[in-house]
Image: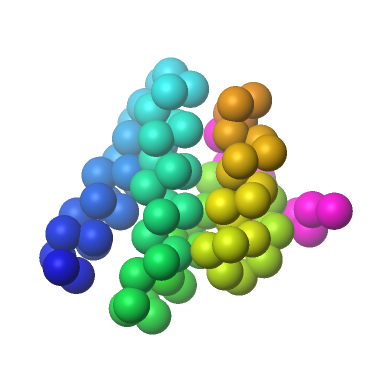
Amino acid sequence: RLRLVTGEIVTGLNRAIHGADTTSQREAVAVLVESLRSDNQKVRDISLRQLRRLTAADPGDDYESWRAWWKENGERFTANWGEPQQTQ
């Protein structure tokens, strides 16, 4: 199971890094958000760090916060690659 989740994270990150289109970037963020549900702390930590890096957002440290943020922002999302900033 961990290998599968880790593979999904790597695939998502590769799409975000190498994907020139917004759809690939959205898919990457969606995979990373779902990865926050992992039982493995290391997977959650990596996912959280990459979400903050890719989105320049920081709605919290947990799946529910990021799921809510993604629900609100996913349709208009484009990769920012900036420094994380607190959201309201």
Closest to the observer, 5 or 14: 5
Which residue is at 61% across, 70% downward? 61
Q: Is residue 53 above or below residue 27?
A: below
Residue located at (46% from left, 43% from top): 29
Tell whether 46 sits left or right of 39: right
The answer to whether residue 68 is left or right of residue 13 is right
Q: Which residues are magenta?
A: 79-88
- Magenta segment includes 3: no
Magenta span: helix, strand or loop, mainly? loop
Screen quadrant of the N terminus: bottom left
Left or right: 32, with 76 as reference point = left
* Colouring convention used in this rendered image of the protein: rainbow
Q: From the viewer's perspective, tell me whether residue 43 is left or right of residue 85.
A: left
The spot of residue 80 in percent (x, y) is 62, 37
Please provide percent x and percent y for residue 50: 48, 56
> Residue at horizontal 38%, vertical 28%?
24
* Residue 86 within the magenta-colored segment of the rendering: yes
> Is residue 83 in view?
no
- Count of number-bearing discs: 0
* Residue 47 against residue 76 in the figure, above or below: below
Residue 65, image x and y in percent?
64, 60
- Depth order, front residue of 22/66: 66
Residue 47 in sight from this viewpoint:
yes
**Residue at x 41%, y 55% (from the top left corner):** 34
